[in-house]
Image (tube, rainbow, N blue to C red):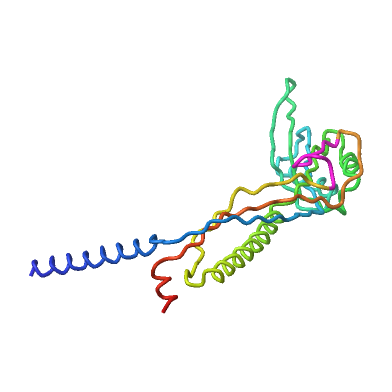
Amino acid sequence: MKGKIYAKFFMLMGILISICAFTTSYAFDYTNQVMFQVTGEQWVKTDSAKVNVTVNATQTQAGLEKVRQEILAHLGKIAEVEWHITRFDRSQDSSGLEHLAVDAEARVPAAQLDNLREKAKSVSQAGATYQISNVDYTPSLDEMEQAKSQLRVALYEKIKQELARLNTAYPQQAFTIHTINFLPIYYGAPRGGPVGLNMVRTMAEPAAAEPIVVSNQIKMTATVYLATTPVAIEQKTK
């Protein structure tokens, strides 16, 4: 009985090994390969900016949660958007008075970017000062990802056209797409504002006219391998 079980086991193992060997041979037995690159570019526009605010306050008798809510309420008067507190540090001076150092940021649409410094001053009060530290006009992550997706679609279309041209020139080869490798994306200099990729400006500097729409250029390159196999050629010629 055991002998029959072992015999069936080794027979099944032999079949599996044969299938794997055939699959491996079929997957990598390419007779012809063609390599080329395609490149495309896309402008990413944004009409908003990431705004950073620094808050320096003196701790009162109110609890920390109430202080946090008060800070968020004042930030909402600077810009009516969703603010995120990114730093909340507490320290104590020699007299025992506790101080708070808070950083907050938000994505603010262009319609609310005017007079940010004046708005920050208006919400400042005794024991709590609000200051606009940076305004960053780099497109948001969602805007960048959407542009990358559109650019990939455009490159896929170029690859499809190149594959069709190759199979028209060599109809018996039956080329197919084997590999597509995307190279690191090139980010060009922004347009519509200060020079520099991040275009971060400290509000303590002299005020200048705020750009409404800022564009970043991205370039994407893909290395493409087209290949054909003996099996594909044989099926094509039948």
For the residue pair 104 and 143, the one nearer the viewer reads as 143
Which secondary structure type mostly characterizes the magenta part of the structure?
loop
Which x, y percent locates residue 159? 60, 63
Q: Quadrant of residue 16?
A: bottom left
Residue, x 73% and y 23% (percent of image)?
93
Residue, x 77% and y 35% (percent of image)?
60
For the residue pair 203 and 226, the one nearer the viewer reads as 226
Which x, y percent locates residue 37? 60, 55
Q: Quadrant of residue 12?
A: bottom left
Task: Count all numbered tags in the image, as a single digit.
Answer: 0
Q: In this view, does 74 lie above or below 96?
A: below
The answer to whether residue 199 is visible is yes
Which x, y percent locates residue 29? 38, 61
Q: Is residue 134 above or below residue 163?
A: above
Return the residue found at the far top: 94
Q: Is residue 220 above or below residue 199?
A: below
The range drawn in magenta is: 192-203
Q: In this view, does 198 lie to the left or right of 14?
A: right
Q: Is residue 191 left or right of residue 228?
A: right
Quadrant (top left/top right/bottom left/bottom right) for the C terminus: bottom left
| Residue 194 drawn in magenta | yes
The answer to whether residue 70 is visible is no
Residue, x 69% and y 32% (percent of image)?
90
Return the residue found at the far front: 169
Quadrant (top left/top right/bottom left/bottom right) for the N terminus: bottom left
Q: In this view, does 212 lie to the left or right of 93?
A: right
Which x, y percent locates residue 157? 63, 66
Q: In this view, does 29 lie to the left or right of 187?
A: left
For the residue pair 173 and 155, the one nearer the viewer reads as 173
Residue, x 65% and y 53% (percent of image)?
220
For the residue pair 223 and 14, the one nearer the viewer reads as 223
| Residue 5 drawn in magenta | no
